[in-house]
């Protein structure tokens, strides 16, 4: 593959994207009216979700700090996916409250409005435009005016090209910039999807089993990526791979869900030593 051209020259190849100059810059997130003066980006308080009498969430309460990387673990059926569905507006809680910062009531917004407010979600299976190049995927994901006329006649500004370049460096796909996404490895597709979320300038990233199906080397690189994003963004990571959780949790907080509520919370070492967690999830 030929070497990647300077990003300042990439606008000549652009066919999509005409956002305000400098609006998308990886690692520098502009606030969108989210009040985090109390230090938390996400509040869930006594959230219950019932499906035909079954409580997928049962009085779930937790909060995530600004810039925090929070790991969520627990057995299948613990409520992890339903929790993410509530945060992103896919599922409405039967009772309880969910706030983005102190002032944005997530239970009153549509999914698209929640995404626009600064919450990005990555599902377990990567979803990329396989017939498009890595560059085109990032460009399509950029916050921009997607109406027909701007799309046909737009060219990237220098700062938009810089934003793509910064994201490429973060996800380590500079050498694959002109490769079709369908030709990438599973791990590379996962990184590309994370990059696409970053192009949307999220304040909070929700990642569902980001290393499922990855090789050991890809898992290691993903841990490095998430540790790099820590502090730049707030992250909630749902994962079953305990070695990976240990790599990214550090001394931070790990939340264990069971039967729709918080069973235990603390450092990885603390939850691993908790008799209740050992009984219902980790085993002896």
Image: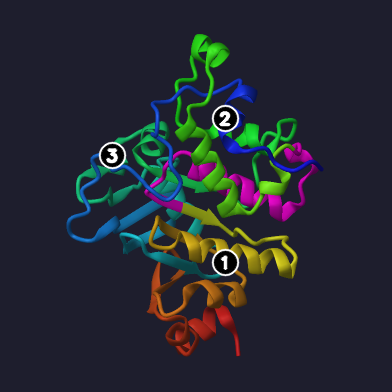
Tag 2 secondary structure: helix
**Badge 2: how crowded within 10 Å, few (<14), some, or many (20+)?**
some
User: Where is residue 257 drawn, in percent x and y?
Assistant: 45, 69
Which quadrant, please, contains the C terminus? bottom right
Name the spot of residue 246 as percent of width and height, x first: 54, 78
Mark 3 Cα within 10 Å, few/some/many (few <14, many 20+)? few
Label 2 to label 3: alpha-carbon separation: 21 Å
Viewer-nearest residue: 98 or 103:
103
Q: Is residue 14 left or right of residue 215?
A: left
Question: Marks 3/1: CA distance?
Answer: 28 Å
In the displayed structure image, the side of residue 195 where residue 260 appears, left or right: left
The residue that label 1 is drawn on is 224
Single out the mark in the foreground, 3 or 1. 1
Q: Which residue is mark 3?
A: 32
Toward the top, the furthest residue is: 149
On screen, residue 271 above or below 135 = below
Location of residue 223 in the rendering, given as x and y in whole percent from the top left corner: 58, 67
Magenta stretch in the rendered image? 179-205
Q: For this view, does 238 lie left or right of residue 58? A: right
Rendering colour mode: rainbow
Upstream in sequence: badge 1 or badge 2: 2
> In this rendering, is residue 95 above or below 196?
below
The residue that appears at 28% across and 43% down in the rendered structure is 31
Identify the secondary structure beneath mark 3. Answer: loop
Q: Is residue 130 above or below residue 248?
A: above
Q: Is residue 76 visible?
A: no
Residue position for label 2:
140
Which callout, 3 or 1, points at the residue further toward the start of the chain?
3
């Amino acid at each position: 593959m030929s070497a990647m051209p300077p990003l300042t020259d990439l606008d000549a190849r652009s066919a999509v994207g005409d956002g305000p100059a400098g609006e998308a810059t990886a690692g520098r997130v502009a606030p969108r009216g989210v009040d985090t003066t109390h230090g938390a980006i996400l509040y869930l308080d006594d959230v219950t979700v019932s499906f035909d009498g079954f409580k997928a969430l049962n009085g779930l309460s937790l909060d995530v700090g600004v810039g925090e990387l929070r790991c969520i673990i627990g057995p299948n059926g613990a409520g992890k996916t339903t929790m993410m569905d509530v945060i992103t507006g896919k599922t409405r809680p039967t009772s309880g409250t969910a706030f983005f910062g102190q002032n944005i009531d997530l239970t009153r917004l549509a999914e698209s409005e929640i995404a626009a407010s600064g919450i990005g979600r990555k599902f377990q299976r990567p979803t990329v435009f396989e017939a498009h190049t890595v560059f085109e995927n990032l460009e399509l994901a950029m916050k921009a005016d997607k109406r027909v006329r701007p799309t046909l006649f737009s060219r990237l500004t220098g700062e938009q090209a810089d934003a793509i370049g910064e994201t490429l460096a973060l996800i380590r796909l500079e050498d694959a910039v002109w490769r079709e996404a369908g030709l990438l490895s599973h791990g590379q597709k996962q990184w590309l999807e994370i990059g696409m979320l970053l192009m949307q300038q999220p304040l909070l990233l929700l990642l569902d089993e980001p290393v499922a199906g990855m090789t050991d080397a890809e898992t290691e690189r993903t841990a490095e990526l998430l540790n790099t994003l820590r502090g730049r963004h707030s992250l909630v990571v749902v994962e079953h791979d305990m070695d990976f959780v240990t790599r990214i949790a550090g001394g931070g907080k790990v939340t264990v869900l069971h039967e729709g509520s918080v069973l235990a919370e603390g450092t990885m070492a603390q939850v691993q030593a908790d008799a209740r967690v050992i009984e219902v999830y980790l085993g002896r």
